[in-house]
Image: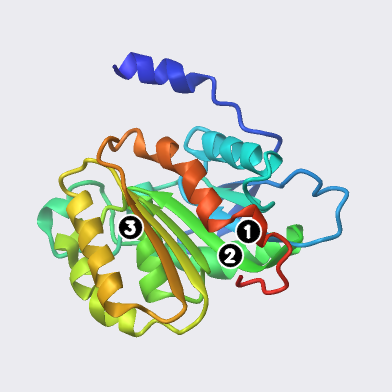
Amino acid sequence: MLAAAFVAHADDVPPTHESFSLASASPAETRRINVYTPPGYATSARRFPVLYMLDGGLQEDFPHLARALDEGIRAGEIQPLILVGIENTERRRDMTGPTAVADDRKIAPRVGGSATFRAFIAKQLVPEIQTRYRADAHRGVIGESLAGLFAIESLLHEPALFDTVIAISPSLWWNDASIVRDAPALLRRLPATSRHLFLTSADEENIAPNVAAFDRALRAAKPPGLVWMYVPRPEQRHDTIYRASERAALRWAYPASRAGDDDPAR
């Protein structure tokens, strides 16, 4: 099965894109950034929404997501946008918040660095993208598994950073599912501004129940301005859910009918 999966994905070729390196101040390291711009970008003067992609390396998920996005834009299903893939350096450090669970800390030499990684995105990467590319005011984020956890954590703890959040099988089990337990209070504190959230999960025993519980917290809180879609996919596995969901998630979050809206927050 693993060999078949490798063959099926080995021919992943991303559409035309650019790459550059960006030095991170904290921690002191260099990040590789991959950027896809939509068809017609070079001959247009307009500005575009930006979707920041976690696990965005060329050996990670950037090729298949950029290809799905490009095909959807060309088919008229998805509005044109810029995709910014952030390649990992220490994934489990960057995608997780602090934890009091001993077993959580065993997954990597260092964990709990999500706030630092989020600061890098907000204070260094976003300004760099706004300088290099014609980006409008709308920012989104997409992530799967631990990266999905980071996306949900960003929505709850720094809601001004992203207007659209796509969380695919987010690892909400982290720190004994503390983010689910804290969700009612955190959701009540969300600013009443326009935001979109797409949630999905596969057949994972430690993920699907927590995502369903988070959806219940959303329905109970009904945060003003937040529009969300929850799509359980029990027929999928953890290793198939990303590719199975990405096209539908992009169509819902960035439908072509919204392209050209004057309000960057849509």
- Residue at x 22%, y 46% (from the top left corner): 107
C-alpha distance separating marks 3 and 1: 20 Å
**In front of the other: 265 or 6:** 265
**In front of the other: 112 or 141:** 141
* Residue 9 locus on image (x, y percent): 46, 23
Question: In this image, 231 relative to 74: left or right?
Answer: left
Q: Are marks 1 and 2 in contact (CB under 8 Å)?
A: yes
Earlier in the chain: of badge 2 and badge 3, it is: 2
Q: Secondary structure at mark 3?
A: helix
Q: Are marks 2 and 3 in contact (CB under 8 Å)?
A: no
* Residue 111 locus on image (x, y percent): 28, 56
Crowd class of label 2 (few under 14; some 14 to 19; many from 20; radius 10 Å): many
Crowd class of label 3 (few under 14; some 14 to 19; many from 20; radius 10 Å): many
- Residue at x 58%, y 65% (from the top left corner): 139
Q: Amino acid at mark 3?
A: Leu
Residue 247 makes an appearance in the image? yes
Q: Amino acid at mark 1?
A: Val
Q: Which residue is mark 3?
A: 149
Q: In which quadrant of the rendered image does the C terminus lie? A: bottom right
* Residue 149 locus on image (x, y percent): 33, 57
Question: In this image, 138 relative to 153: left or right?
Answer: right
C-alpha distance separating marks 1 and 2: 5 Å
Q: How is the image coloured?
A: rainbow
Is 46 placed above or below 201 here? Answer: below
Identify the mark at residue 50; answer none if there is no mark. Answer: 1
